[in-house]
Amino acid sequence: MDEQALLGLNPNADADFRQRALAYFEQLKISQDAWQVCAEALAQSIYSDDHIKFFCFQVLEHQIKFKYSELTEVQQQLIRETLITWLQAQMLNPQPEKTFIRNKAAQVFALLFVTEYLTKWPKFFFDILSVVDLNPRGVDMYLRILMAVDAELVDRDVVHTSEASYYFALTLEARRNTLLKDTMREQCIPSLVESWYQILQNYQYSNSELTCQCLEVVGAYVSWIDLSLIANERFINMLLGHMSVEVLREEACDCLFEIVNKGMDPIDKTKLVESLCQVLQSAGLFSIDQEDDVDFLARFSKLVNGMGQALIASWTKLIKNGDMKSAQDTLQAIEAKVALMLQLLIHEDDDISSNIIGFCYDYLHILKQLSALSDQQKANVEAIMLAVMKKLTYDEEYNFENEGEDEAMFVEYRKQLKLLLDRLAQVSPELLLASVRRVFNTTLQNWQTTRFMEVEVAIRLLYMLAEALPVSHGAHFSGDVTKATALQDMMRTLVTSGVSAYQHTSVTLEFFETVVRYEKFFAVEPQHIPAVLMAFLDHRGLRHTSPKVRSRTAYLFSRFVKSLNKQMNPFIEDVLNRIQDLMELSPPENGYQALLSSDDQLFIYETAGVLIVNSEYSAERKQVLMRNLLTPLMEKFKVLLEKLMMAQDEDRQMALADCLNHAVGFASRTSKAFSNKQTVKQCGCSEVYLDCLQTFLPALSCPLQKEVLRSGVRTFLHRMIICLEEEVLPFIPSASEHMLKDCEAKDLQEFIPLINQITAKFKTQVSPFLQQMFMPLLHAIFEVLLLPAEENDQSAALEKQMLRRSYFAFLQTVTGSGMSEVIANQGAENVERVLFTVIQGAVDYPDPIAQKTCFIILSKLVELWGGKDGPVGFADFVYKHIVPACFLAPLKQTFDLADAQTVLALSECAVTLKTIHLKRGPECIQYLQQEYLPSLQVAPEIIQEFCQALQQPDAKVFKNYLKV
């Protein structure tokens, strides 16, 4: 071996050495006999360096995985002998190998097993067992090999290229794995199980590590071997014995869980679970102590959950089979576990609690199906409800300002509890409402002296009721009187208790979330609106000390104002005055730290827009208010744009460009308030927005920070096309001209949707403009597409692909909007060039999305120009280029019908051929029969069949024919 290259295997080696080692590995993988050098190195323990040993196993692994069939019988035998020799050496070495080497060796053994077990090496496991016997190091390797074999047979990690080949490989592998497992079950599983029993018996008191490894193996294999080999007295008794040995009980728990999880007859399953429970109960495991080892209790909770869910699955099957007697017995067994389930659910450790939620959820599902609940079952429901309410509570350690992994886990756990609460509501909505009301009222009466987490959870429960007791369109305060009254009382308490002033972010946020969730309350009791608005606007909301609260409140405030609509009328000007300082555009140079981020300010601008537009003011008054809102933005914009033009420092340029972009974004956002009923015109605001346009458009000719500025102005134009309609048209030509100057792929890609929007909306109104800018736009596109790029530059290739798609989407919009004259009037040479790009897109590029668009364009052009009175030469083009494209595209290697987009492309290809036939009639059939298809050497009967399908009046017939 190249000793120098091997030095690079050490993780501490420098980059050059590491690079050389990688290259050497690639070289050895291709080499015919390098694996033999590695096999010899392993068999004779030539190297002591761990990384070189690992490397040798990697080379062998590659040989077995990809090139095994190329080896002779003798060479294959050599690999088997190498591995056995290496295994024998493990028991004699003074020190055991590092874990990562043992695991890699086990993977190599497992690969050889799946390759050879059915043919060359049926005694695989017996050979290994005869070598290792009960030697602890040998047993360790034997157990690792078993886990690696299970991973090969049960895991589904197939490297896939395309969907079709992936499924094919998956099916082949699944068949191979089934055959391997069947053969193992017949030939060696009983012996393997016996070896596990011997290992457990031999090492359970002397070597906990090996015992745990062996329990893991049993747990893994139990899912696919005969359960009676494990679920018998001697095995179960041993496992139950392990449950009281501290170092073994976690693995024993997992092993029992796998046994319980195994599919079997419902009556047998119930018996198995009950016998396990009796023994576990008599061992004292059913009385949970909060001080117990939480890691063990988390596994135990998972086991109890498995047993509970197994019994519930049995009950469901028995009910379905009509065996009411056995179902009743199983239900009693389930009920007997509820007390234990509740102990685990209420445990202070959330992992332990989380592991039992599945059982709890399924138990409630049973109760939901029963016609009446017993007193005990009602008590169980109430106990679960109290447990959920308690467990929803934050603990002291929760870090609200800097949420990390622990906090994220608690948020997930809360989501699980919410599902339980929703299920409780289905079982007993009255009980849930009464319980929440009791907790809520008790807490809010004394909120000043209550800990934050209890206040938060009381409000949270009210919030959760909205989804737990669903109604249509948030109508919580009508319909069922009891429920409506209870919710109304709680909401009244929430907004009048003063709890919004509680000094904790979680309570503050929960208050605002709940107020917005139940906005319909304010239609019933509008007298509370001013107090809630003040909470939003002062130090409790938008001016809170916490940026997190301010940010969320900005969003919630906009939702609150939108939902109240006309009820906001008395407060509009007051609110606009109070939020004025929050809308200040903060330029980079003043160093002033704004209360809200620019994203938050978007919501405030939208809210201001909504207040003005939805008000009952006259159009004149609305115009004045809108001008007051937007003029400061326009003035700042002009000043900042001048500063940007003179700025030298790039960081300062970026900061100024961002600020300019925010100004455009804010103006854009105010326009979201308009609707079909309240248009810009009706509100008298057209002039203000036209002024904005005139103010913002000069930014397009700014040579600095083009990408940022163009993106903002482009978005504003999109909005104005919707809001100002034809009033925007005079601005489009110069804006387009600026946006087409020095543009890159991404600029064009984002500019084309704007042109598409204008084309689709105004159609013939913009035809002269489109005719004028058609070729300049195409030249800009072609220029970018023809730019040379590095062969391996994936992002450049993707950008070009996306631009090509945008280009075809543009042509589709033009032709689809009935404006083919835009193309027709570009002069014969240009028209021909455009048509050829479409043919190329349909055939040459392996991009089904673009191909589909190209065929849509072609069929539209044939529909418009393909008749007898079409443009001169077009009929010729149809036969020479469009018809061949319809055949050449599907014949390409890259045309993959397993891909959904390709199927759509084929469908459009069929439409194109149908349209040609529709426009040209028998002449088309004659051309296909006598000229084109014979030139492809298609058999006469196939030609006949094809032409018949094409002439069918139902287009579906031909589409299906083409697909087949």
Image (tube, helix red, strand yellow):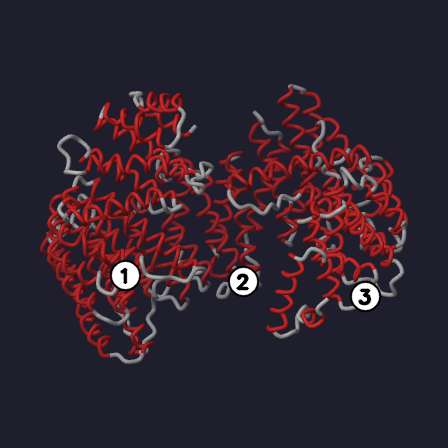
Q: Are marks 1 and 3 in contact (CB under 8 Å)?
A: no
Q: Which residue is mark 1?
A: 711
Q: Which mark is residue 457?
A: none
| Residue shown at the point (81%, 43%) measured from the top left | 124
User: Dot 3, crowdedness within 10 Å: few (<14), some or many (≥20)?
Assistant: few
Q: Where does residue 60 sit, x and y in percent of width and height? A: 72, 55
Disc 3 is placed on an element classified as: loop
Ranked by sequence position, the earlier of labels 1 and 3 is 3
Ranked by sequence position, the earlier of labels 3 and 2 is 3
Quadrant position of the N terminus in the picture: bottom right
Q: Where does residue 150 sit, x and y in percent of width and height? A: 72, 44
Instruction: Evaluate whether residue 90 shows in this view.
Output: yes
Q: Quadrant of residue 605?
A: bottom left
Identified by mark 1, the residue type is Ser
State the residue lying farthest toward the left. Answer: 620
User: Dot 2, crowdedness within 10 Å: few (<14), some or many (≥20)?
Assistant: few
Disc 1 is placed on an element classified as: helix
Q: Where does residue 795 sit, x and y in percent of width and height? A: 41, 59
Identified by mark 2, the residue type is Gly
Left/right placement of residue 429 relative to residue 307 reads: left
State the residue lying farthest toward the top. Answer: 322
Left/right placement of residue 278 relative to residue 739 reads: right
Q: Which residue is mark 2?
A: 404
User: Dot 1, crowdedness within 10 Å: few (<14), some or many (≥20)?
Assistant: some
CA distance separating discs 1 and 3: 64 Å
